[in-house]
């Protein structure tokens, strides 16, 4: 029988099951309001998807050495942990689902799916020609797992994809080149983490460089886009947008985004689909295995990540 050497606190039964056959690791389910006695020995904490009690949790775990997230985004945790506690993301779990949402959003916009559904409801047969994703020039900002997964899917639709990252490398343009790239793309898809550098990356000047009728797609985090600047473009009907995230979020009643023209809006569901727990815990288990072997997790967050 394996000797248990690492105690991992998990927020649900999916986590308990995922670690059931992992040698050297004991998974213990916890409730945020009532930590189990095993918390005194816990070296790893897996917060829930929407954990809002991180500071109290961390302060209650004297042996904590790693916070392993179920999400790819880490902005809520960066800068919140003691220096001896590592932070690791779930990068690699949600890229496919998020990329699928982007493709679905673009097909909905370009093929007029909402308009045809409105016609069905009114029993109107209004045949007309639509746009197509084929041949569209798509600028994907963010070349991590999410961006790579999106490019693979867009390639299958014969779109022309340009990838952008902080620095240029083979097949990827530098973010410093955006001023030159924006006027020549039909779509800008945001797949970046939320950091001080990406906050309001898409501002009025950014949007002004996009061509008429272009589409802004935000599958990253709401504050990557300056909401007020985007509203100006939507209300003038010069640009279109598809948003899975907003700033503020959740979107409050009466906010002008609810009624903005040229907008497809979903409530932060790009990664919320069947199999999400299995995909997330596959990554989590591998990150904890690395930690248990004395290695740094491959998804370790450094700086603002």
Image (cartoon, grey):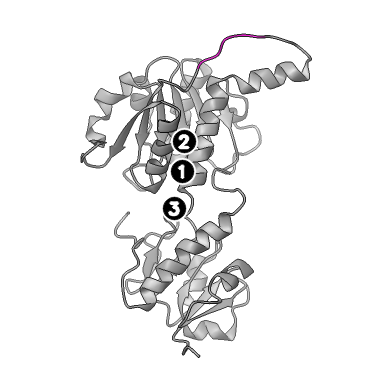
Question: Is the residue marked by circle 3 packed among few (<14), some (14-19), or many (20+) residues within 10 Å?
Answer: many
Task: Tell me, yes or no, if residue 246 can be seen here.
Answer: no
The answer to whether residue 129 is magenta is yes
Label 1 sits on a secondary structure element that is: loop
Horizontal and vertical percent for residue 290? 36, 72
Which residue position is annotated with label 3? Answer: 73
Q: Secondary structure at mark 3?
A: loop
Instruction: Say whether marks 1 and 3 touch (CB < 8 Å).
Output: yes
Question: Who's the residue at 48% across and 72% down the image?
Answer: 45
Number of residues whose C-alpha sits closer than 10 Å to that of mark 1, classed few (under 14), some (14–19) or many (20 or more): many
Q: Which residues are magenta?
A: 127-131
Which label belongs to residue 218?
2
Proximity of marks 1 and 2: CB atoms separated by less than 8 Å: yes
Q: Is residue 278 left or right of residue 163?
A: right
Is residue 74 rendered to the left or right of residue 173?
A: right
Label placed on residue 221: 1
**Vertical placement of residue 256 versus 299, above or below:** above
Marks 1 and 3 sit apart, C-alpha to C-alpha, by 9 Å
Residue depicted at 31% across the width and 70% down the height: 296
Q: Which mark is residue 246?
A: none
The secondary structure that dominates the magenta segment is loop
Left or right of 85? Residue 285 is right
User: Total number of numbered labels?
Assistant: 3
User: At 35% across and 22% down in the image, what residue appears?
Assistant: 185
Residue 171 location, x and y as percent?
A: 25, 36
Residue 23 appears in the rendering: yes
- Residue at 73% x, 10% y is 125
Q: CA distance from mark 3 to mark 2?
A: 14 Å
Q: Earlier in the sequence, mark 3 or mark 2?
A: 3
């Amino acid at each position: 029988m394996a000797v248990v050497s690492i105690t991992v606190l998990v927020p649900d039964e999916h986590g308990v099951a995922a670690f059931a056959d992992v040698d050297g690791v004991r998974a213990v389910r916890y409730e945020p309001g009532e930590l189990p006695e095993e918390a005194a020995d816990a070296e790893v904490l897996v917060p829930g998807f929407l954990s809002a009690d991180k500071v109290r949790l961390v302060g209650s775990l004297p042996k904590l050495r790693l916070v392993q997230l179920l999400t790819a985004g880490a902005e809520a945790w960066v800068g919140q942990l003691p220096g001896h506690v590592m932070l690791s993301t779930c990068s690699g779990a949600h890229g496919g689902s998020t990329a699928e949402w982007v493709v679905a959003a673009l097909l909905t916009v370009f093929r007029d799916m909402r308009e045809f559904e409105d016609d069905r409801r009114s029993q109107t047969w209004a045949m007309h020609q639509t746009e197509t994703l084929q041949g569209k020039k798509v600028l994907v900002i963010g070349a991590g797992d999410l961006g790579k997964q999106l490019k693979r899917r867009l390639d299958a639709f014969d779109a022309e994809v340009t990838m952008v990252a902080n620095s240029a490398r083979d097949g990827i343009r530098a973010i410093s080149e955006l001023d030159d790239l924006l006027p020549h793309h039909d779509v800008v898809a945001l797949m970046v983490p939320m950091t001080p550098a990406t906050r309001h990356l898409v501002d009025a000047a950014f949007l002004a460089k996009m061509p008429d009728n272009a589409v802004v797609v935000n599958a990253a985090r709401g504050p990557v886009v300056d909401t007020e600047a985007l509203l100006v473009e939507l209300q003038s009907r010069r640009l279109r947008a598809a948003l899975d995230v907003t700033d503020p979020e959740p979107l409050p009643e009466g906010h002008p985004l609810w009624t903005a023209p040229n907008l497809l809006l979903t409530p932060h569901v790009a990664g919320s689909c069947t199999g999400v727990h299995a995909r997330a815990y596959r990554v989590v288990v591998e990150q904890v295995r690395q930690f248990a072997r004395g290695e740094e997790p491959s998804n370790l967050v450094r700086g603002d990540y």
